[in-house]
Amino acid sequence: MVLKRWVSAWIVASLFAGLAFLPGVAAADPPQEQYYLSVGDSYATGYQPGGMTTEGFANQIVPKARHKGYNLNLVNVGCAGATTTSILVQKGCPKDRLAIGAKGYGRLTQAQAAARFLRHHRGEVALVTVSIGGNDVTACAEAEDAITCVAEAATSIERNVGRLVRKLRRAGGSKVTIVGTTYPDVLLGQWVRKPVNKSIAELSVVAFKSIINPALSSQYLSVGGKFADVTAATGAYRPLDRYTTLPPYGRIPKPVARVCKLTWYCQKGDIHARDHGYGIIAGLVVDEMSRFQ
């Protein structure tokens, strides 16, 4: 009986394989290779404690997009530490701040390098991601009036990101998909990280939901791009009065536990994502890319 089933399966498989050789039935061509341009800060380059990683969200987008039928060739011009101002005015990027395998851009700003690439490869770029703005508000965590600090930073973020994305859209044309990303709300980790500051944790949710993310989103949408709300996808907007248990922190709010699992902040005070955290961002971008087409 086992032999009979095996022979039947082999015959069926052989018949389907043979279809490719019949007249009028051709095997599907592999998808055409297109470029994917990653622009921005250390999230764009894929930083983790100790240095750059090949598990950043830009790297993970390539295989995830392949499952959706895209054949992407990653080009990364990101520069760790970039702000919405430096991306427009700072020339070059130190080698240790570039993504693994990335080429420098000498006397060009990152925005100029990105625009030049888009112009030179117009019609060949399927996706541009932009991760910028986090370093503009980092200092606000220690400000006396954190919300006012974030609101003031958001004004410059909105202005600068607007300039950046208009430049990218002009260079790349109307058909290239531009997806802007935001960040996990790592400051939720102040619920457990010493010196514990639960007020900062609570205020950080308000800052992202009501100030930072609306400022970013408005600019990406203004040029026909998409916005991937990483803050929402990593659970930050959920109620802080729902608890779970996470070693070694004990009983803590679920959004805090989630950010501890997805980033290095609770353990090491580092704002960057773990592999799985970067994977969530990659999945969001690929989903937006698929909806865009």
Image (cartoon, rainbow, N blue to C red):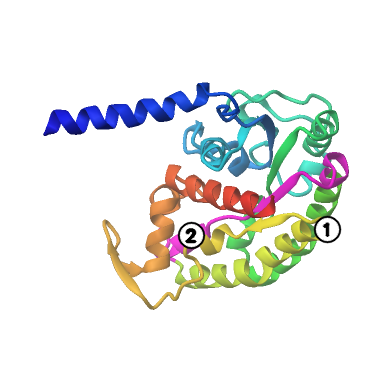
Contact (CB < 8 A) between labels 1 and 2? Answer: no
Residue 196 percent coordinates (x, y): 42, 64
Magenta residues span: 168-196
- Where residue 228 sits: x, y (%)? 62, 56
Q: Which residue is mark 1?
A: 159
Which disc is residue 34 wearing? none
Q: Nearer the viewer, residue 100 or 127?
A: 127
Quadrant containing the N terminus is: top left
User: Which residue, as the protein is rendered here, is positioned at the far left?
Assistant: 1
Q: Is residue 175 magenta?
A: yes
Name the image quarter holding residue 140: bottom right
Labels 1, 2: front one: 2
> Residue flagged by tag 2: what amino acid is it?
Thr
Point out the residue furthest to the front here: 23
Residue 37 drawn at (x, y percent): 70, 36
Q: Is residue 128 left or right of residue 188?
A: right
Name the element at disc 1. Answer: helix
Pinpoint residue 68: horizontal percent, then vertical percent.
Answer: 55, 43
* Residue in the foreground of this view, choosing between 254 and 292: 292
With respect to residue 256, does 126 lie above or below?
above
Amino acid residing under circle 1? Arg
Q: Nearer the viewer, residue 82 or 61?
A: 61
Q: Residues within 10 Å of mark 2 (few under 14, many from 20)?
A: many
